[in-house]
Image (spheres, grey):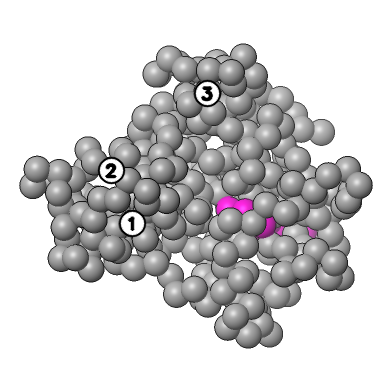
Amino acid sequence: MSPNEPSTIVVQHLPANRKGRDFVLSDVHGCRNTLERLLNRVRFDAVRDRVLSVGDLIDRGPESMACLDLLDEPWFHAVQGNHEQMLLHFCAQSLAAGGQVVWEESDDFLVNGGSWIERELVDRRRRLGTRLMEVLETVSRLPHILVVGSGAERYQVIHAELSQSSLDHEPPVYGDRDIDQSFENLGPGERELLGETLTWGRRIMHLRSNRSWPERHPDLSTTYCGHTPFPEVRRRLSHVCIDTGGYLPLVSRERIEQEWGLTLIEPATDTVYFAQTDERPGWAAWRGRAYR
């Protein structure tokens, strides 16, 4: 088990779903119960339908390991988020020490909600457990980009953004052709920077009104992403950010009255489904809405 090489951009292709529906899922962050309620409400069919996750399955919510268990389901596909990346780096240090957990309270993973991992350790909570080791192998193989279908129905799933090193570039984002060529035109340093942008970038969704990019970019198919929470879905430069802050009511009492929760979006119909997360474990209020 080890994280992907910094200069490697892993792209996975999936065929269009001809049997059922696809749903793209926002950052779950350990809120498995809220997700289950949302799937029940849309009458998700595990035989025909698929869920494609923008990553960040873990941390902050109460059910991180249960969310990682989703990676075993044939209907569930995910890209690697920055929280999965932090988990891999944390555990890589422990594996380098012979499996003995290197427990540093200042580690980025622990500081950002990773304390749940203590429950998955064995031998007086000092070594990585067997199930956790199995899951880490799967997490280490998660792609940076999922490409679904082709032609007019094509769409992509990433965690953060596909922006170039400078938003002053024209075009300011990479396009479908760059993805299909596996970014072979980029040098190792540029690919490493892109790998970081795909999991950590927030420039597009943090742009203020004085930098108003159009909703779509002609070179890039619809690209669903997360990472930057906001109470509603946003579109910029073909990026559709669906991180609606599912974990926020669990960590901040000021956020409880706001509409933060998990989002599913159905690419075929552009319909958004939303489950509001409550501070009480196991509770979620639901509503569905059309984005357009």
How far is disc 3 from disc 1 in space, using C-alphas?
26 Å
Residue 120 lies in quadrant:
top left
In the figure, is residue 62 to the left or right of 18?
Answer: left
Say which quadrant the N terminus sits in.
Answer: bottom left
Where residue 275 sits, quadrant-wise, is top right
Residue drawn at x 68%, y 62% as measured from the top left? 162
Q: Residues under labels 2 and 3: Cα distance?
A: 21 Å
Residue 83, position in %: x, y? 46, 50
Q: In which quarter of the image is the C terminus?
A: top right
Per the rendering, the mark at residue 117 is: 2
Distance from Cα at disc 2 to Cα at disc 1: 10 Å
Dot in front, 2 or 3 = 3
- Image: magenta residue range: 152-161
- Tag of residue 252: 3
Residue at left 64%, top 21%? 259
Q: Give the residue at mark 1.
A: 90
Q: In this view, does 185 lie to the left or right of 33?
A: right
Is disc 2 in contact with disc 3, using a CB cutoff of under 8 Å?
A: no
Pointers 2 and 1 in contact (CB under 8 A)?
yes
Q: Which of the 4 quarters of the picture holds residue 65?
A: top left
- Label pair 3/1, CB-CB below 8 angstroms: no
Please state which of residues 15 and 24 is positioned toward the viewer in this rendering: 24
| Sequence-earlier tag: 2 or 1 | 1
Q: Position of residue 164 (x, y in %)?
A: 73, 68
Residue 49 relative to residue 217: left or right? left
